[in-house]
Image (cartoon, grey):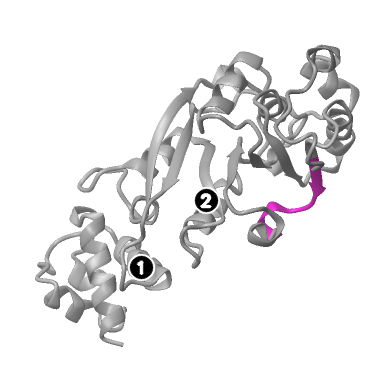
Amino acid sequence: MSDDAAGLPIPKDALAALPPLREVIARHGLAAKKSLGQNFLLDGNLLDRIARVPGSLAGATVYEVGPGPGGLTRALLRAGANVVAVERDDRALPALAELAEAAPGRLSVLGGDALKQDEAALLPPGTHVVANLPYNIGTALFVRWLTTDAWPPWWATLTLMFQKEVAQRIVAAPDTSAYGRLSVLAQWRTLPKIALDVPRQAFTPPPSITSSVVHVRPVAAPTGVSVRTLETLTAAAFGQRRKMLRASLRGLAGGPEALERCGIDAARRAETLSVAEFVEVARSLDASR
């Protein structure tokens, strides 16, 4: 990104000259592929609303995964962001190259698999992530970004589109049906919230379910507990969520003993433990090793 371009709005005539997204999709043969988890948003007002969720992006670096024909990318550029986009679908690269020409120095497009990117090396600290994540890799990417060892992480905020049921799991409270491993991993050192719901009719093609945009902000991490221990603990506890903890943690070395040290009744089920209690048990496990 050139310094003189950073944060400068794209001239309105350049934006106005961009062809409609439906035309871009037709011209480049970008029919959404189910195998790539693609569903495109074309409503400019809705896309601008999503781009406003993180707050002001003027001059900020934004990382976008799976831009497709570039609908959200346009909104991010209109918001004044400098965008680094990763796109696996080679069919979309010419369309994104045209968008980059309309926003000189403001858009960098990388072809490749987002799951194979080293974001901490690729992006400056404080990068915002804003993406309509492909459904087939969304949760995997999210968990990876949540469980980075370095904290505060390389990202400043995450603004991500998920299937609504996944979004509800991310923000779920203990002792609810949606509460699970993803809830704990999301909430132990971040503050996630659902920013808005997006009806299925807003997409091309329409998915079978409603989607939600989740906004995540990192907070201070609890001390004395490792990411890997918490991952292992929650995997064991929720892997057999209908069982009592004494049974689900039997295969986890030191698990039952850690419950006892923390004063947690082993007859409870995983979904009844708060995030703080999971952190306490993980801390006890780490301290005993």
* Three-letter amino acid code at the position of disc 1: Leu
Q: Is residue 170 magenta?
A: no
In the rendered structure, the answer to whether residue 156 lies left or right of residue 9 reads: left
Q: Position of residue 245 (x, y in %)?
A: 20, 67
Q: Based on the displayed image, in which of its 4 quarters is residue 68 positioned?
A: top right
For the point 84% across and 28% down, the residue is 99
Q: Magenta segment range?
A: 108-116
For the point 18% across and 54% down, the residue is 272
Answer above or below: position of 244 versus 179: below
For the point 86% across and 30% down, the residue is 95
Residue indicated by mark 2: 142
Could one spot residue 44 in this view of the protein? yes
Residue indicated by mark 1: 230
* Three-letter amino acid code at the position of disc 2: Phe
| Along the line of sight, the residue nearer the viewer: 9 or 19 | 9
Q: Based on the displayed image, in which of its 4 quarters is residue 289 positioned?
A: bottom left
In the rendered structure, the answer to whether residue 257 lies left or right of residue 145 reads: left
